[in-house]
Image (cartoon, grey):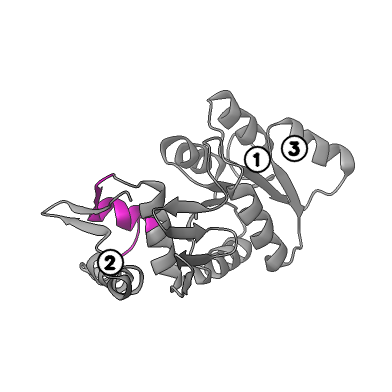
Amino acid sequence: MRVLAVEDDPATSGMVARMLGKEGHTVEVVATSDDGLWMATEFDFDVVILDWSLPGVQDGLEICQELRDRGRWMPILMLTGRSAIDERVAGLRAGADDYLTKPFAFEELSARLQALARRTPQERPAVLQVGDLHLDPAARSVRRGDKDIALRPKEFSLLELFMRRVGAVLSRGEILDQVWDMNFDGMSNVVDVHVKSLRNKIDKPFGRASIETVWRVGYRLQEG
């Protein structure tokens, strides 16, 4: 899952990024309303965590409203210290999909984000299926036929990306951007390493070759 966190408190944003990262999600963090609006407009995210009180010309409520006015319909979770009923209602009326007050338990935040990610504007089935390969984003489970497959967090995110874009050729740069993040500064062959590991788990034991290498471009998950 690709998450944008618009939060000016370093302790909160750091905790959210760290914990969601451990679950295998890609998290981009910005601290101002201007940066949040630009990121949410220019890039695609599965869900946005939006703080109410932000430095900048607009607050979180106004950012939420403007995103909806611009036709950006990704799920938005308002994360704030405001707990009055009328303020919660204002947030929902501005276009937010859910509301969580500080302080909060990370487990609740994670569960709410998983639920919201399944409510995106595009028709996104609860369980992804390509041939006999099944992936459940909410349960974080994968199986081929009736055999369960255990994947590491990045392998799971990589497979989810392939299955959501089945048949499309994905460049290594695009994969890095979607599964890792725009500031990733690791091994240059990290995509190839993870694709090989994924093939060894979802293809090789079953005599399949569903992940195709497209020479000098990237990879593609074949249909069927």
Res 195 label: 2
- Front residue of 161/4: it is 161
- Front residue of 187/114: it is 114
Magenta segment range? Answer: 168-185
Q: Earlier in the sequence, mark 1 or mark 3?
A: 1
- Mark 2 surroundings within 10 Å by alpha-carbon count, few (fewer than 14), some (14 through 19), many (20 or more): some
- Front residue of 131/113: it is 131
> Is-magenta flag for residue 183?
yes
- Front residue of 155/167: it is 167
Kind of residue at disc 1: Gly
- Pointer 3 residue: 91
Residue 165 position, x and y percent, is: 36, 46
**Residue sticking out furthest to the top:** 69
Q: Is residue 189 left or right of residue 143?
A: left
Q: CA distance from mark 1 to mark 3?
A: 9 Å
> In the picture shown, does residue 46 fall above or below 105?
above
Kind of residue at disc 3: Gly
Res 60 label: 1
